């Protein structure tokens, strides 16, 4: 089976139920390269992210991350992973985030599905748009129709209030003859609530940075409409993956188009969130420790 690592959320619902409602957090490892499929293995890797963008939103200051990860993947489908991320922004230069995950993946022919949970421990100085989150619970399903691959997942995010995010994506996979190189143009859709973003704006963004509204400096105090379920973001991405023996190299450029701006209220004014399209990218390398094929 040729599985895809669809890192963004997906358009599946547009095809299946015609609903017009995507670098992050999808699985990014096949159990097929350079090792026997029925073996357990360890992945260790490093990656650079040009900026942290979540559902098309980002912090006022750029947040480039350098991350190191390690994970154990049992042949039964269970896995655990850990990631440490270093904030490489100017005059920041600190460990900003620890991430721990565990879950189960199921593969059968062209179908895959799974469930996982992730916990976040942010530095108390962190200003990234995800820094209001504490944990999530995710379930996904993916089917490769050969011509198109479709993916959908649902994630419950936890902070002061919980959020549900639905992700859907569609991609077309291009392979070289030996399958070492894979390019997957992908269109993704994100929809859900924004309570996490209300918490971020109230306690992180406006709590640490004064905003200017109506010509005077005021402290932000509220963000409205965070609990309404809306389309949040559209994304175009072109994941590129190259396998060489036990190494995997990944390049992921993403163009995000956030929609449905939230309404923000400060002490004096009410106004719409200023949304802008964002381009960001990540580059990473992974090494797989496992028994060789016999």
Image: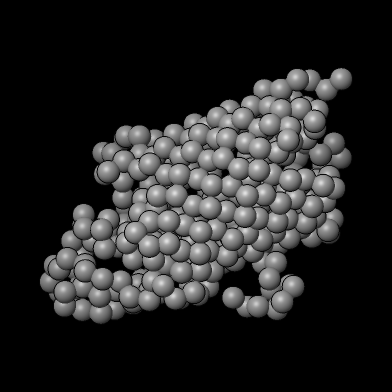
Tag count: 0
Colour scheme shown: one colour
Q: Position of residue 6 (x, y in %)?
A: 66, 52
Q: Which residue is drawn at the image coordinates 56% and 40% (left, top)?
A: 102
Work out which residue is located at the far left of the displayed protein and give it.
Answer: 216
Q: Is residue 62 above or below residue 272?
A: above
Q: Quadrant of the N terminus?
A: top right
Name the residue nearer the viewer: 64 or 154: 154
Q: Position of residue 215 (x, y in %)?
A: 15, 74
Q: Is residue 47 above or below residue 155?
A: above
Task: Say whether residue 112 is left or right of residue 280.
Answer: right
Task: Say whether residue 45 is left or right of residue 122.
Answer: right
Task: Say whether residue 272 is left or right of residue 143.
Answer: left
Residue 276 visible in image: no
Q: Position of residue 162 (x, y in %)?
A: 43, 62
Q: Quadrant of the C terminus?
A: top right
Q: Is residue 195 above or below residue 44?
A: below
Task: Say whether residue 69 is left or right of residue 201.
Answer: right
**Dividing the picture into quarters, in which one does residue 60 lie?**
bottom left
**Dividing the picture into quarters, in which one does residue 203 lie?**
bottom left
Q: Which residue is drawn at the image coordinates 66% and 61% (left, top)?
A: 152
Q: Is residue 213 above or below residue 290?
A: below
Q: Which residue is drawn at the image coordinates 58% and 35% (left, top)?
A: 80
Residue 137 visible in image: yes
Q: Position of residue 29 (x, y in %)?
A: 67, 39
Q: Which residue is drawn at the image coordinates 25% and 79% (left, top)?
A: 270
């Amino acid at each position: 089976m040729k599985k895809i690592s669809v890192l963004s959320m997906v358009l599946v619902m547009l095809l299946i139920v015609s609903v017009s409602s995507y670098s992050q957090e999808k699985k990014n490892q096949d159990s097929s390269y350079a090792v026997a499929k029925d073996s357990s293995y360890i992945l260790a890797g490093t990656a650079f992210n040009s900026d942290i963008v979540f559902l098309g939103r980002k912090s006022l200051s750029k947040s480039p991350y350098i991350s190191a990860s390690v994970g154990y993947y049992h042949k039964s489908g269970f896995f655990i992973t850990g990631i440490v991320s270093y904030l490489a922004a100017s005059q920041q230069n600190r460990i900003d985030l620890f991430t721990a995950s565990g879950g189960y993946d199921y593969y059968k022919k062209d179908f895959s599905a799974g469930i996982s949970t992730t916990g976040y421990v942010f530095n108390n100085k962190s200003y990234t748009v995800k820094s209001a989150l504490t944990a999530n619970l995710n379930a996904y399903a993916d089917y490769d129709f050969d011509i198109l691959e479709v993916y959908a997942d649902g994630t419950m995010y936890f902070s002061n209030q919980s959020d549900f995010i639905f992700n859907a994506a569609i991609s077309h996979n291009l392979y070289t003859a030996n399958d070492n190189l894979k390019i997957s143009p992908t269109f993704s859709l994100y929809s859900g609530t924004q309570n996490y973003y209300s918490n971020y704006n109230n306690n992180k963004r406006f709590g640490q940075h004064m905003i200017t509204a109506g010509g005077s400096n005021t402290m932000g105090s509220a963000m409205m409409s965070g609990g309404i379920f809306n389309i949040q973001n559209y994304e175009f991405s072109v994941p590129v993956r190259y396998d060489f023996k036990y190494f995997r190299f990944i390049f992921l450029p993403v163009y995000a188009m956030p929609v449905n701006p939230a309404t923000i209220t400060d002490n004096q004014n009410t106004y719409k969130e200023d949304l802008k399209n964002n381009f960001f990218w990540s580059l990473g390398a992974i090494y797989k420790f496992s028994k060789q094929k016999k």
